[in-house]
């Protein structure tokens, strides 16, 4: 029943958005304190790293949509469309991708965008220190054919490549700025996007100004984008209602169904492609035996978590793929009933008959806190004492990256290709595999999923991957979030895209 209610709520609100939200009708016409030509957007976390090569956070990617252009992008239906690459061809054997680039594009610092810039960026993303290296591992060589043509030569067919290039791996930074600033590039980022970096006050706000030389005619539509950091969604809503912000990237889920007929603000509520769950450090003695991990999974009531912490705005799930994915398997994703006795037996078999104790790391978001508190109560039923330690999101990322944790409540915003929800997380050398999970069969399946081009065959491979992960349990999937935004009806030009990002180029206030 919960899933049906959740989907119905999403459909109703999406219909309200489609009919009512973007017309600007019913608006008071008042601007936020930033002025009529400024769009102010609240973010629930402070973006940790403003360099696409180093980024691993969802909120980074939201800011990036304004700062950086990509080789290719996504439309409102999730289709891959041209951006800095006007067109492309793929060789019959799937080993050569030829991109034809836009002419006359310049970076914010005046550096010319061309094939050499693409080569620089992709080689930079492939280096050892890059978080993009796994996404581009199949790219063997980058060839500059002429100033506006570049070829990517692959070592083997790689089905997700175009999908990867719609995100951080395809974002172009200024070679001049990157070479000059080195590790400090993220403090003064330079792209080709519709807005340029102006200033940042950590923990407070980030200001971008209009790129007057943007390659797309009559774009951007506003003079300035201001990202305000508001970790509490309720505080963000108060600011949205008062006109202090024009858009929120998080909306209080208990309020999501209350604004269908509001004259000033509306709600965008759409299914998201990602997942939220529990990352376990498999090098920690508490989680080395998979029977312990299996026991914890059996003790969790996902339906209760979504109903209480998310007010039904989301989908309980046991896998990395949400209903938005073409590889989604409803039977595998469906939560099982809580099995306390079964969980206790598994703990006893693992030598933990008296239970165990560990600490979960989480961020300071109120929903995160509530999810962890619910889990804490559910685990007590099987004699497991879970302590909760919260910190800011940047610190949480650093700690998991260094392996300085036992368990962490961490999620993934999701990708349009299923490879993007699995490979970096559970491949033995994956860039996001902070669990330390390593299995040769899993590695082989993940590689097959990348090299096979037939979608039906690929779906079967990802089903096998999900089945194995449900047995090995390096990560406990809890639910799939919805993308829920609050938006002033004075704002026009916002188009929701399945990746959950906020694209600002066409946004303006009436």
Image: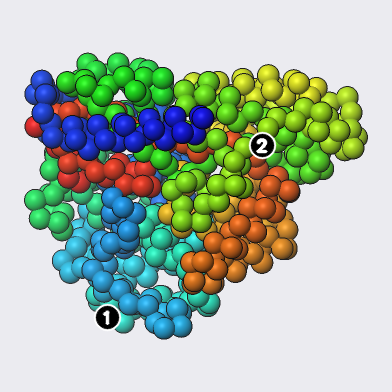
Image coordinates of residue 3 in percent, x first then y, are 49, 34
According to the image, label 2 marks what residue?
A: 336
The answer to whether 136 is drawn above or below residue 254 in the figure is below
Which of the labelled discs sits on residue 146, or is there none? 1
Question: Residue 80: x and y, percent?
Answer: 32, 61
Disc 2 on helix, strand or loop? loop
Alpha carbon separation for disc pair 1 and 2: 56 Å
Image quadrant in which you'd find residue 336: top right
Q: Quadrant of the C terminus?
A: top left
Q: Is residue 161 left or right of residue 295?
A: left
Position of 117 compared to 356: left or right?
left
Residue 217 place in picture, x, y as percent: 10, 55
Determine the residue positioned at 34% across, 54% down.
78
- Residue positioned 68% across, 19% down in the render: 377
- Figure check: 44 above or below 492: above
Would you identify the image quadrant in which residue 192 lies?
Answer: bottom left
Q: On the image, which quarter does residue 378 sit in?
A: top right
């Amino acid at each position: 029943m919960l899933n049906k209610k959740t989907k119905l709520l999403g459909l109703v609100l999406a219909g309200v958005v489609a009919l009512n939200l973007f017309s600007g009708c019913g608006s008071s016409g008042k601007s936020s304190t930033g002025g009529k030509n400024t769009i102010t957007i609240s973010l629930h976390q402070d973006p940790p790293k403003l360099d696409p090569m180093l980024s691993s956070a969802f909120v980074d990617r939201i800011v990036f949509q304004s700062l950086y252009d990509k080789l290719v992008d996504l439309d409102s239906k999730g289709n891959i469309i041209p951006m800095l690459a006007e067109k492309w061809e793929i060789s019959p054997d799937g080993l050569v991708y030829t991109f034809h680039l836009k002419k006359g594009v310049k970076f914010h610092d005046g550096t010319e965008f061309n094939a050499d810039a693409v080569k620089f960026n992709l080689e930079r993303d492939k280096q050892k220190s890059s978080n993009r290296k796994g996404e581009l591992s199949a790219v063997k060589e980058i060839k500059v054919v002429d100033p506006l043509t570049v070829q990517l030569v692959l070592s083997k067919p790689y089905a997700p490549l175009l999908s990867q290039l719609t995100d951080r791996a395809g974002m172009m930074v200024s070679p001049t700025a990157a070479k000059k600033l080195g590790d400090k590039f993220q403090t003064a980022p330079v792209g080709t996007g519709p807005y340029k970096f102006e200033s940042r006050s950590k923990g407070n706000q980030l200001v971008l100004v209009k790129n007057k030389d943007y390659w797309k005619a009559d774009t951007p539509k506003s003079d300035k984008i201001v990202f305000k950091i508001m970790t509490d969604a309720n505080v963000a809503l108060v600011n949205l209602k008062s006109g202090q912000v024009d858009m929120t990237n998080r909306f209080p889920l208990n309020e999501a169904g209350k604004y269908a007929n509001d004259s000033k603000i509306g709600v965008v509520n759409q299914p998201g492609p990602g997942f939220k769950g529990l990352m376990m450090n498999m090098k920690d003695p508490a989680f080395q035996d998979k029977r312990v991990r299996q026991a914890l999974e059996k003790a969790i009531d996902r339906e209760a978590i979504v109903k209480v912490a998310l007010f039904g705005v989301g989908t309980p799930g046991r896998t990395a793929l949400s209903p938005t994915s073409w590889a989604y398997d409803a039977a595998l994703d469906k939560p099982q009933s809580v099995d306390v006795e079964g969980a206790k037996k598994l703990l006893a078999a693992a030598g933990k008959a008296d239970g165990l104790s560990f600490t979960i790391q989480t961020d300071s978001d109120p929903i995160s806190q509530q999810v962890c508190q619910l889990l804490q109560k559910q685990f007590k039923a099987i004699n497991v004492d879970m302590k909760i330690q919260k910190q800011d999101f940047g610190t949480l990322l650093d700690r998991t990256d260094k392996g300085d944790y036992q368990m962490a409540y961490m999620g993934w915003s999701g990708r349009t290709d299923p490879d993007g929800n699995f490979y970096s997380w559970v491949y033995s050398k994956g860039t996001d595999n902070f669990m330390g999970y390593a299995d040769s069969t899993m590695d082989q399946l993940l590689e097959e999923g990348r090299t096979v081009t037939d979608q039906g065959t690929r779906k079967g491979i990802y089903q096998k991957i999900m089945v194995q992960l449900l047995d090995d349990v390096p990560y406990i999937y809890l639910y799939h979030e919805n993308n829920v935004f609050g938006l002033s009806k004075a704002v026009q030009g916002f188009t929701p895209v399945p990746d959950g990002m906020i694209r600002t180029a066409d946004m303006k206030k009436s």
